[in-house]
Image: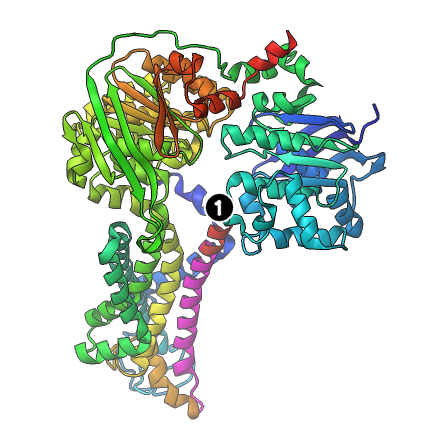
């Protein structure tokens, strides 16, 4: 098969103050017409550099060697009008965060028209924009034209982004992490849409860290580790018979939705927290537009429970977890914790409750005070209960040990930690005080896949002791099944399903639960298809 | 921490290092003034009035026969001292107020910020002039006046920092960890809000010196025989007409160089901040 886009021996070096960083080394890959190529690897691996090198958008100081050809024409060193023509009509790029890649001060319709004007003027631009929006599955395209990016959801922005990229009929469409920040159902839809563009001789390259999601839509997978290609082959071969150890690690890290919770107990402990009729209404500007984020929520959390709160983004699951933590005052109902309604407590009274409930956050880097050392961070909640510094120090060591961190980490600052280490510190902070209830807010979604697996193993080990209650907020059903005893499905601020995990998974009653189950990316169904 | 200081210093931009070098020289001159010249700052040499630079009086003498060089060296004590003391007051006061307003939010913040608006509505120099005129021009009053007047921008700066920090997860995490209000403010928010202060404070020191000099120039600063650069320029201004340029020019150069030093430090840090 003759290649459409051909990259030969690409190397990119970025000089920094300390040393030269080899972002890419000897990368050779090609995209054929009508082919969808997935480039997968972890953050820092250099996968985005490929997209940047192809579109001539490398950081200023970077040096590049190698050869890139499109349709047999050398496009490695283009300049001026030739480069402009190439960027639109040759290779088009969809960026990582669509909302920030779109101009915030122009309506999406105008941005679409700008693009047409630059590359293929003529005709009724508005009509063409409507047509383009329709093609990418935007509902009511006429109305969308006059909206600004901030008035659209992340998924809609990504669709606009794709429409913009397609506007000049590129030969190759490159999407760089197009689904970051989108929830499972949307991720599937957007990837399908991008992959569907590989027709009429057009090639598609999708860059992502999510091998499971890519395996659903790509013909071929290219695995990148530390700037090198470690594996390149048809999707099925790569996912089923990985030759490379790193590829195998990536695949093993994908949670298998069929994996069940190891220990299940019928008997539940004493009631720890009881939410009854809880509602939260956010007040809009000037008291108008009252939006109910939660309504009429009843939930019981018992000692030893591991409960998953599952829902799409915007479903109210974060509001629910913050209400449980007492960070948010509900506008209706009671939140009883150890016999006290924490919704009615003052700041000072809540402080007394904090020693019994702790939280672990989604983005571990942002959740740690950048000016504090690991030691200070972990000892922060401990200061509530332990005034004696030596005993506190012993407790810090114990907590670090519990999450698998060496005491030598104590003097480090957050920026000296990797994402996984930072999340371990976050867990240590929550566990140090020995709380009865730990709320985990998407504890792995900001981490690289292989690190995710490590953190999940750690969380599983902790929950299996059943000495406290864990509430885990997640959009990922696969991890939930392997980790939690009970599942609560939230949709539009209401609990639509609740019960033991297996009951929810094997016989989903509510349509929302079924939709979430269907959307969950996993390598499992790929296996079944081929057998 | 102390040991790592030299390495940290080397990483600073050359602008900051140049500024620090100038300020170190000025500070050394201030500290060792009595040993650097044989003349006291208010000591009169009856042999020479308004004489140009010459051996013994390297920068000449003024209308009272006082040695310009030793007055400049001693003036560094006053100018540097007042600048640093008043900026310290401004930073402390502004930081506290901004921190509390930003953290508390609500009506306290609203009312507080409007009061700050009122202060800032007056031209700074006019306000300083009025306060100095009412309170009298003792050294303490000058420091307090310049300090108070410079405080509102710091309050604004810190408040803005705190407002954006409040959206960060680690601040919520700190509250969830059970921190008291005091420890929220001083353990979690303050250390993370201080960076812009480091940039503004040196620039502000330069301003403070200029303000002191200006007040002295119009006669509301350091009382007449006192060795202060602004007062010296003011007194020397009349001599320039008669061709005796040295009485006003040399303190002017000292003032310029010191303010330059502060500005180099401030802008150098700012540039570093932007890059980061």
Q: Position of residue A427 (x, y in %)?
A: 34, 24
Q: Position of residue B186 (x, y in %)?
A: 25, 45
Using the image, determine if residue B24 lies above or below residue B57. above
Parent chain of label 1: B
Q: Residue A522 appears in which quarter of the rendering?
A: top right
Q: Residue at x 37, y 68 (%)?
A: B207
Instruction: Depth check: give the residue in front, B231 or B200.
Output: B200
Q: Secondary structure at mark 1?
A: helix
Q: Is residue A468 magenta?
A: no
Placement of the N terminus of chain A among the 4 image quadrants: top right
Q: Is residue B41 left or right of residue A404?
A: left
Q: Is residue B54 left or right of residue A242?
A: left
| Magenta residues (range) | B242-269
Residue under pointer 1: B11
Instruction: Depth check: give the residue in front, A448 or A531.
Output: A531
Total labels: the figure holds: 1
Main secondary structure of the magenta stretch: helix
Placement of the C terminus of chain A among the 4 image quadrants: top right
Q: Position of residue B241 (x, y in %)?
A: 43, 92
Q: Residue B184 appears in which quarter of the rendering?
A: top left
Q: Residue at x 66, y 14 (%)?
A: A236
Mark 1, Cα crowd under 10 Å, few <14 / some 14-19 / many 20+, is few
């Amino acid at each position: 098969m003759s290649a459409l886009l051909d990259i030969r021996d690409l190397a990119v070096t970025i000089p920094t103050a300390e040393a030269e960083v080899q972002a890419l080394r000897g990368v050779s890959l090609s995209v054929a017409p009508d082919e969808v190529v997935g480039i997968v690897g972890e953050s820092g691996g250099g996968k985005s550099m490929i997209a940047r090198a192809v579109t001539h958008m490398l950081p200023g100081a970077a040096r590049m060697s190698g050869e890139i050809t499109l349709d047999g024409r050398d496009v490695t060193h283009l300049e001026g009008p030739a480069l402009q023509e190439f960027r639109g009509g040759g290779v088009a790029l969809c960026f990582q965060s669509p909302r920030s890649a779109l101009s915030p001060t122009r309506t999406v319709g105008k941005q679409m028209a700008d693009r047409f004007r630059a590359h293929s003027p003529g005709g009724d631009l508005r009509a063409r924009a409507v047509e383009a929006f329709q093609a990418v599955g935007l509902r009511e395209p006429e109305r969308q034209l006059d909206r600004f990016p901030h008035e659209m959801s992340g998924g809609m922005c990504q669709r606009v982004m794709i429409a913009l990229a397609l506007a000049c009929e590129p030969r190759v469409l490159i999407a760089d992490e197009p689904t970051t920040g989108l929830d499972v159902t949307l991720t599937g839809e957007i990837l399908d849409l991008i992959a569907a563009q590989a027709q009429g001789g057009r090639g598609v390259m999708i860059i992502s860290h999510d091998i499971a999601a890519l395996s659903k839509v790509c013909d071929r997978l290219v695995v990148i580790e530390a700037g090198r290609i470690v594996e390149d082959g048809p999707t099925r071969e790569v996912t089923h018979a990985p030759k490379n150890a790193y590829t195998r690690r990536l695949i093993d890290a994908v949670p298998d939705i069929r994996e069940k919770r190891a220990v299940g107990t019928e008997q539940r402990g004493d009631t720890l927290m009881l939410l009854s009729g809880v509602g939260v209404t956010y007040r809009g500007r000037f008291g108008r537009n009252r939006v109910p984020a939660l309504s009429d929520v009843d939930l019981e959390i018992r000692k030893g429970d591991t409960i998953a709160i599952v829902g799409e983004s915007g479903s109210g699951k974060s509001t629910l977890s913050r209400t449980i933590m007492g960070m948010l005052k509900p506008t209706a109902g009671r939140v009883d914790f150890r016999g006290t309604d924490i919704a009615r407590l003052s700041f000072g009274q809540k402080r007394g409750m904090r020693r019994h409930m702790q939280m672990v956050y989604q983005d571990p880097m942002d959740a740690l005070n950048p000016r504090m050392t690991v030691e200070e961070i972990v000892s922060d909640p401990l200061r509530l209960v332990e005034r004696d510094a030596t005993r506190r120090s012993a407790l810090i060591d114990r907590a670090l040990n519990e999450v698998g961190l060496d005491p030598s980490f104590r003097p480090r600052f957050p920026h000296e930690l990797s994402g996984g280490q930072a999340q371990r510190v976050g867990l240590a902070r929550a566990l140090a005080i020995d709380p009865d209830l730990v709320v985990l807010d998407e504890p792995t979604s900001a981490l690289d896949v292989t690190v995710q697996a490590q953190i999940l193993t750690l969380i599983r080990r902790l929950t299996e002791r059943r000495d406290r209650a864990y509430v885990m907020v997640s959009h990922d059903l696969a991890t939930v099944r392997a980790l939690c005893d009970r599942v609560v499905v939230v949709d539009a601020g209401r609990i639509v399903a609740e019960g033991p995990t297996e009951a929810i998974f094997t016989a989903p009653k509510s349509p929302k639960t079924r939709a979430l189950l269907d959307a969950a990316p996993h390598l499992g169904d790929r296996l079944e298809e081929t057998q | 921490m102390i040991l790592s200081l030299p390495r940290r210093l080397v990483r600073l931009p050359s602008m900051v290092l140049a500024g620090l070098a100038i300020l170190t020289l000025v500070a050394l001159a201030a500290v060792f003034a009595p040993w650097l010249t044989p003349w006291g700052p208010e000591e009169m040499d009856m042999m020479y009035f308004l004489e140009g630079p010459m051996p013994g009086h390297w920068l000449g003498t003024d209308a009272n026969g006082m040695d310009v060089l030793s007055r400049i060296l001693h003036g560094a004590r006053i100018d540097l001292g007042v600048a640093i003391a008043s900026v310290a007051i401004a930073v402390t006061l502004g930081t506290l107020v901004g921190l509390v307003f930003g953290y508390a939010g609500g009506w306290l913040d609203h009312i507080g910020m409007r009061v700050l608006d009122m202060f800032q509505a007056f031209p700074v120099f006019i306000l300083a002039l009025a306060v100095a005129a009412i309170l009298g021009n003792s050294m303490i009053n000058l420091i307090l006046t310049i300090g108070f007047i410079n405080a509102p921008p710091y309050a604004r700066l810190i408040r803005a920092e705190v407002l954006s920090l409040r959206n960060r997860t680690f601040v919520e995490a700190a509250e969830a960890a059970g921190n008291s209000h005091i420890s929220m403010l001083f353990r979690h928010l303050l250390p993370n809000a201080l960076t812009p202060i480091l940039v503004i404070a040196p620039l502000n020191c330069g301003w403070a010196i200029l303000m002191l000099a200006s007040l002295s120039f119009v006669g509301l600063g350091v009382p007449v025989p006192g060795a202060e650069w602004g007062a010296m320029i003011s007194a020397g201004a009349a001599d320039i007409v008669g061709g005796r340029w040295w009485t006003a020019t040399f303190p002017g150069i000292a003032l310029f160089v010191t303010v330059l030093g502060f500005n180099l430090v401030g802008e150098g840090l700012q540039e570093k901040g932007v890059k980061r």
